[in-house]
Amino acid sequence: MAKIFNNFQLKINRFVIGLGIMACVTLYFVSCDSGKDEKIQLTKQRRKINLIAHRGASDVAPENTLAAVKKALQGPADYIEVDVHQTKDGAIILMHDATVNRTTNGQGTIASLTLAEIKKLDAGLWYDSAYQHERVPTLSETLALVKGRKKLLIEIKKGRDGLYNGIENKILAIIQENKAQNWCILQTFYDPVLENIWKNELAVPTHKLIVAKIPFIPLYFDHRLQWGNFDKYDRAMAINANQYFTTQGFVKELHNSGFKTYPWTVDDPQAINRVLALGADGVMSSSISQLEIE
């Protein structure tokens, strides 16, 4: 029986990977057809929708930096999304990848570097010389900058070798120190992280991240294939899937179950209108600054 399930799981994994490849190809051709600098008019909505600046205003400033957060504060976004990891000495910093290689002039995993070592790195020059000497910010520095002017959506990431021990409790403590629980939201792909957040006395809203829900059967993919429905996430406000696996039926299913949904990551401005037309409650996008809001 285990062998049958493993074979079935392998087939589903291949199916999801195939869909992902198709989505990437679609994204490539769509992006080729859209003018990057052209302003896109957001279709007027009769309902409240939320625009979420992905990794800050990452289309006009280096991602997950204070510069990107500042730009997002000045723009039309309702929420600012950032990613967090934990350093060797337990500090919580903003970065998407588990290593510093891509977005700084350094090398190594975040888990193997101290905060002092990471603070020496340049996190802006890779993007543009105008941002030279931009530093990797801590979560505390980010909260101090935002100060509740917009909501902050914090994605809790995984290290290269597994989940960071105690990262969610440290994040909650930082949020409490900054009295930010009313304007921060935590999201993650990882159920143990969510479960630990829900056990904490500090009530901070949560979102569950997935890649895709398999139609017609109780099967979905977050960071691995999972069997079951979404009832176990009833303490989460939203379930957010990849935009290419977000259908009108899926949105309706989530709404009927009491969840909101904010598909990720809708980088083509014209696609934002398409996703909102499906009934999504908003979008995570790296192109928020290209939108013209009525």
Image (spheres, rainbow, N blue to C red):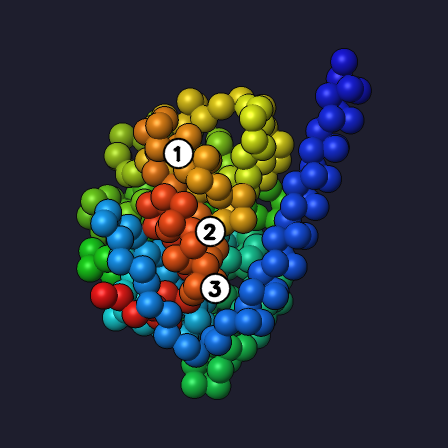
Q: Nearer the viewer, residue 87 or 21?
A: 21
Residue 53 vs residue 137, the one in the foreground: 53
Which comes before the other along the chain, label 2 or label 1? 1
**Residue type at mark 1?**
Lys
Label 2 Cα neighbours within 10 Å, binned few <14 / some 14-19 / many ≥20: many
Is 55 situated left or right of 152 in this image? right
Say which label, 1 or 3, has the lower sequence index. 1
Between the C-alphas of marks 1 and 3, the distance is 23 Å
Q: In which quadrant of the rendered image does the N terminus lie?
A: top right
Q: Residues within 10 Å of mark 3 (few under 14, many from 20)?
A: many
Marks 2,1: beta carbons within 8 A: no
Find residue 97 and report its horizontal and vertical position in percent.
55, 57
Instruction: Tell me the residue at 74%/32% (across/down).
Output: 10
Q: Which marked residue is nearer to the observer: mark 3 or mark 2?
A: 3
**Farthest-out residue, bottom:** 129
- State how far apart marks 3 and 2 are (Cα): 11 Å
- From the image, state whether disc 2 or disc 1 is nearer to you: 1
Query: Residue at point 42% right, 51% down?
Result: 275
Residue 268's mark? 3
Q: Position of residue 171 (x, y in %)?
A: 36, 45
Q: Residue at x 39, y 34 (%)?
A: 252
Task: Indicate the amino acid at tag 2.
Answer: Trp
For residue 176, above or below residue 77: above
Look at 25% across and 70% down and name the residue there: 74
Residue type at the position of mark 3: Asp
Number of marks drawn: 3
* Numbered circle sitting on residue 252: 1
Q: Which mark is residue 264?
A: 2
Which of the labelled discs sits on residue 32, or is there none? none
